[in-house]
Image: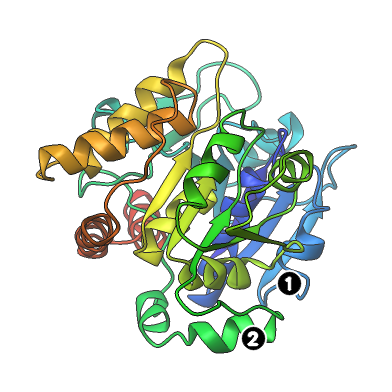
Amino acid sequence: MLWDLFCRVIDNHGDLGVCWRLARDLSARGQRVRLWVDDPGALSWMAPDGAPGVDVIRWDRGPPQIDPGDVVVEAFGCDPPGEFLARMTARPRPPVWINLEYLSAEAYVERSHGLPSPQTVGPARGLTKWFFYPGFTPATGGLLREPGLLAERAAFDRDAWLAAHGLAARQGERIASLFCYDNPALPALLQTLAAVPTLLLASPGPAQGRLRACQPPPALRIAELPWLTQPDYDRLLWSCDLNFVRGEDSFVRAQWAGAPFVWQIYPQHDGAHATKLDAFLDRFLDGADPADASALRACWHGWNGLAPWPGVLPEAVRWHDLCRNWRRQLAAQSDLATQLLGFVAEKR
């Protein structure tokens, strides 16, 4: 099938990151994808070689006059152009129209996944838009996970990947990655990480900017990374004993890495992000030892400015076991692209 996937870049790279992963995954499964994006600039480092079967179309100024394909996916309610919607209604067999929503662990996701939204006004009048929610349970649309991803993870050679990027851990040194929004808790985190020898691999953006303004403790080595392609970013997470991630895309990839991670959720002015953070923690920590759950929750709350930074990290071995068990639960569910293909086939 031919898919039209619409994406707007708001103020970070996560929206485009999710959309590119989906486009690449669909094309690898034999689909043809047109990725419509208003600002494709980040693809120059995220996916410099593109992907077979994926065409990128810029649509910020007067979208090209192109007939719709078999499936139209608007990511995160980004609203395709009105003239494109009108052409959808004019087709003898309208495309399946899907709103791919943001990822959340909140209870409403299971209730809302797969619901129809009949269009009664405007250029799309008469069409039906379907809500498709990623999620963490079998009652949701699942998570992006390419076929063979976990097998690649299991066969990964950390030392070889690090060496190819001019990096190496010293004897007894922990490796951590840092990808964050501007975070006032960073100086406190650096002191905590320095409790044991640590190599901190910092991604571009606010992480590197904040680090340059700090005076790292002597036990902490810092390496500033360039922007990495998506496959290399995955391998960065696989190389680390601890990952600090942000937003949606890196959050999901940290879960597939199976190593301890801390998530900085995208902050919202109305404080709704706190509810979303706790909804995930409630699922993630279900069945965990109460002391371990309390320590991890305090760490995540402190990193997200919802409580003081606790000054210590959860116990590493039990944290690692928790993350691997969580990954095992997620891997038992169908991935997002598989579910999306099945959903489209049903609606067609």
Up-down: is 219 above or below 165? Answer: above
Depth check: 310 or 121 in front?
Answer: 310
On the image, numbered disc 2 is attached to which residue?
163
At 50% across and 73% down in the image, what residue appears? 239
Q: Please, what secondary structure does the residue beneath circle 2 have?
A: helix
Q: Amino acid at mark 1?
A: Gly
The disc at residue 23 is none
On the image, numbered disc 1 is attached to which residue?
50
Mark 1 neighbour density, 10 Å: few (under 14) some (14–19) many (20 or more) = some
Depth check: 236 or 96 in front?
Answer: 236
Residue 198 rendering spot, x and y as whole percentages:
53, 62
Q: Please, what secondary structure does the residue beneath circle 1 have?
A: loop
Residue 211 rendering spot, x and y as whole percentages:
72, 45
Q: Identify the residue at the far top of this view.
A: 270
Hey, which quadrant is residue 332 in on the image? bottom left
Q: Is residue 232 left or right of residue 103?
A: right
Residue 230 rendering spot, x and y as whole percentages:
62, 66
Q: Amino acid at mark 2?
A: Ala
Mark 2 neighbour density, 10 Å: few (under 14) some (14–19) many (20 or more) = few
Which dot, 1 or 2, sits closer to the camera? Answer: 2
Q: Identify the residue at the far right of this view.
A: 61
Mark 1 and mark 2: span between their CA atoms? 25 Å
Hey, which quadrant is residue 337 in on the image? bottom left
Q: Is residue 321 left or right of residue 268?
A: left
N-term-proximal mark, 1 vs 2: 1
**Mark 1 and 2 residues: CB-CB less than 8 Å, in contact?**
no
